[in-house]
Image (cartoon, rainbow, N blue to C red):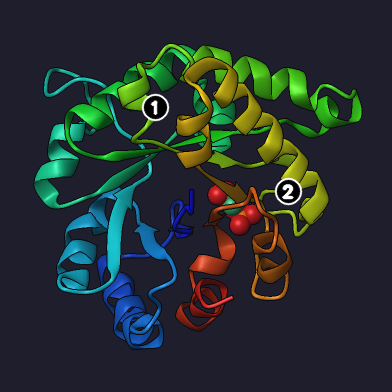
Amino acid sequence: MSRKPIMAGNWKMYKTPAETHAFFEAFKPLVRDAEHCEIIICPPFPNLHAAVEETKGSNITIGAQNLHWGREGAVTGEVSGHMLQAVGCSSVIIAHSERRQYFGETEPDVVRKAQAALEYGLTPIVCVGERLEEREGNRTEAVLGEQFDGGLAPLTPEQFAKLVIAYEPVWAIGTGKTATPEMAADAHRFIRARAAAKFGDALARGVRILYGGSVKPDNVKKLMAEEDIDGALVGGASLDPVTFAAVVKY
Ligand code: PGA
């Protein structure tokens, strides 16, 4: 089964609405002809509306970086999938390692957030990945297995079929240290095998697994040459339109 690559930019806590406008003005013409992949940009909440407006009728869709699992309620500081759908988002990142590390997100959160995202028509981009001490302790597969079993295995096959997984080794995020294509491919194969064991071969072959962690124009091509790497989730290199266009057009 051929899986259409996804090149996704995670802007984290960067850019104002004016900067969002400037980004898309420069970025859109650069990627206008890119048909080989889906392009997603995930700005902070206050820029979602501007980003959706800027990308109407283009080959770019907009995702959020987090959501609450409820529809509405007395939950100060949170944003729901219902609201993200209403503003025009198509996808949402779930359990990025910074959410896990700084805000205590756990596997049960992944389950309820992924279910809520799907309920509101948003594609969940669920992040998994080991920390440095876990890799050094030869625990990478154990950690990925626990994250899969806790966060993804509880979903139904219908739900699993609609989501995207992002493998992001925590030690490679924002550090300039990329996993080698072989290391990333090993992790992707492990995750796909776990998916096959739980959901069957067809769904496992169909699920897109993105790599994230210091993806740049000069390393993306080798990563994308790996059979099991179906795209990238890009932080720092997604903030500049020319740089991210170069990543998109690897
Ligand atoms: P980075 O971030 O590309 O800046 O390493 C990736 C991510 O956190 O998704």
Q: Nearer the viewer, residue 232 or 24?
A: 232
| Residue appearing at x 30%, y 67% in the figure | 60
Q: CA distance from mark 1 to mark 2?
A: 26 Å
User: Quadrant of the rendered structure where residue 27 is?
Assistant: bottom left
| Residue appearing at x 52%, y 38% in the figure | 205
Q: Nearer the viewer, residue 53 or 37?
A: 37
Label 2 element class: helix
Residue 150 in the image: state x and y as whole percent. Answer: 53, 12
Q: Nearer the viewer, residue 186 or 227?
A: 227
Residue 83 in the image: state x and y as whole percent. Answer: 13, 38
197 left or right of 26 in image: right
Tell me, for residue 160, which label it has, or none.
1
Question: Vertically, is 12 above or below 51?
Answer: above
49 left or right of 191 in image: left
Ligand 1 within 8 A of label 2's CB? Answer: yes
Tell me, for residue 172, which label it has, or none.
2
